[in-house]
Image (spheres, grey):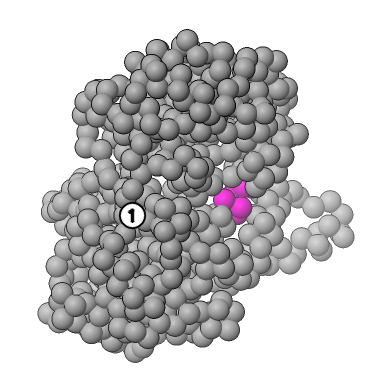
Amino acid sequence: MQDVVQWLKDNGNLKIIDAPLDVELEIPHVAYIEVKKDHSRPLLFTNPINKAKGITYEMPVLMNIFANQALTEKIFGRHPDVLAQGIDELLKLKAPKGLRAKLAMIPKLFSLKNVFPKRLRFKGECQEVIIPKEQVDLDRLPILKTWEGDGGPFITMGQVYTQSLDGEMQNLGMYRLQQHDKKSLGMHWQIHKDASHFFDQYQKVGKKMPVTVAIGGDPLYIWCGQAPMPHGMFEMLLYGFVRNKNAQLVKSITNDIYIPRDVDIVIEGFVDPEAMRIEGPFGDHTGYYTLQEPFPVLSVETITMKKKPVFAATVVGKPPLEDKYMGWATERIFLPMLKPMAPDLIDYRMPENGVFHNLIIAKMKTLYPGHAQQFMHAFWGVGQMSFVKHALFVGEDAPALQESEALTRYILNRLDASKVLITQGILDHLDHSSSKQFVGGKLGVDATGEPVEEGVESVLEDAELLAKIQAISPRVTALKQYMTDTKTPLCIIAVEKVKSQHKLIKKLKVLKSHIKLLVIVDAANNDLDEPYMLLWRVVNNIDAQRDVLLEPFIAIDATHKTEVDGFMREWPGDTFCTKEVLERLQEKGIIYIDETFIKKFGLLPF
Ligand SMILES: Cc1cc2nc3c(=O)[nH]c(=O)nc-3n(C[C@H](O)[C@H](O)[C@H](O)COP(=O)(O)O)c2cc1C
């Protein structure tokens, strides 16, 4: 990572912050704010400290490595679309006809030899320093505590290397790791993920599971860790494909797991299949806290590192953050892999303010009735795509998927209750909206085809419509309409919620001639003038089976849920910055933000 630091200085406009800053809240807050700015930069904190524990760390903390799109592209060495094209060509590989075609294929096949990782017989640079078990002390690493409500410090960019019980399959997954104490880490591999499946195998036979966690090295390892590769495919194959260079792996010192030779820090250990421990809470990439839950624990056997390691970390919370850019590359590179099951798919987008799996917008060529529904089911049935809660399909004549406004207008002109599919399926482990964890509502919208014939009968001014609604329920505090020039204007209202919103929706039937699409949010912490954060809120908070009504108009209840909604789980809170920390950082001249910025990104409660 020292090379990466130099590379970021030369290519990424790296910002170096020498002021001593605390790993608890201060450093994470600086990184959180930086990546929300236009032209955001990677950050190197050269003097991390921990005031509460009285520690001055020996290694710097590198954050926002994927600080923006241009930098992400440079890390890949090519635009992700170019890589996607390469994958597409491989998937379509046909036996060549004729000598010329055969010759043209040779370089392609030859480059494939670089895909497979190489196992080296010697030690790696990551093993220059070896800390034996008795001297292991995780407090020596500048592990960050991001949010005030977090259950402790978490390693946020750990590459978790595991293997199946029979050693046949290897896996790299990026999972957060809670520092429980000086020698153990909580393994937050979620129930659907590969390492969790491996863990099940070890648990069944009561055998300790070897795990090695790596930090740092080529930033592409980090990206590979989060890439949704099919089960059984080692992410290092993808690394080899992107870099056109075999990943070079060395054996861990105390177990048989292989890790890249050039990572900065390596934490080796075993997970006892019987010993679970409460993990969390943790302010997650949904922008909400994930609640406490038991997860396996890694007992650390040894830590190895380079002589001059750099500690890589990220911050997750409300969008936009670094995962926006990692997710963008993933979205582009995985497009060709979706096509075999959905051949008429043209393009798709999973916007970061839809928290990726909460919203997909896909463009397709429709060939027959029900084609969009067929794609919905295909998506909901395959790999991590099955976590998607809300899937909107548009036709090939739709604007480019990046043109959010034009695209929304296109959808609103085609939105029709008869083309809305509400069903049930598996949900991301982190989803908080469904009444039962892991399973809940799915919403599919077929917005392909011609615009609907009937639009809203008459559009009222916001103030007039609000007055009419308030006459029905004084708990409605604000209203804003978007895209009133479309067939289906979007009317969003804020409420002081005390009871189920279904009752309000029923009462609003009398306003059917003025409303075709209604969205309800809580009055607290929602600004009706900020569509970016509203979308984030709405797709997070709804379970379509419970919260989307198709009568008397399409209505979406995106308020927080309680017993009045039959919701008996705990509803988590938002990730908010700590006001005093923001003020302190402003005073020190480390950050510069104003009230507009704070409100725009929901940094503090309002
Ligand atoms: C910053 C970041 C943090 C993540 N944290 C977790 C986590 O704690 N647990 C988890 O299961 N997935 C987490 N993920 C998502 C996984 O990395 C992703 O689903 C990956 O494809 C899992 O790999 P696997 O299918 O090999 O298990 C995270 C992703 C990112 C970008």
Identify residue for label 1: 604
Q: Is residue 320 above or below residue 131?
A: above
- Badge 1 marks a residue whose secondary structure is loop
Magenta residue span = 331-337
> Residue 466 vs residue 459: left or right?
left
Q: Is residue 186 visible?
A: no
Question: Residue 200: x and y, percent?
Answer: 26, 46
Q: Is residue 30 visible?
A: yes
Report the front residue among 227 and 105: 227
**Residue 376 in the image: above or below residue 77:** above
Question: Which residue occupies the foreground of this view, 152 or 113?
Answer: 152
The three-letter code of the residue at mark 1 reads Leu
Residue drawn where x is 75% and y is 64% of the image: 106
Relative to 95, is 33 on the left or the right?
Answer: left
> Residue 34 falls in which quadrant of the image?
bottom left
Per the image, is 336 magenta?
yes
> Height in image: 267 above or below 341?
below
Residue 145 x %, y %: 26, 65
Q: Residue visible at 51% across and 28% down?
A: 463
Indicate whether residue 316 is drawn in magenta: no
Q: Is residue 412 left or right of residue 561?
A: right
Residue 45 figure quarter: bottom left
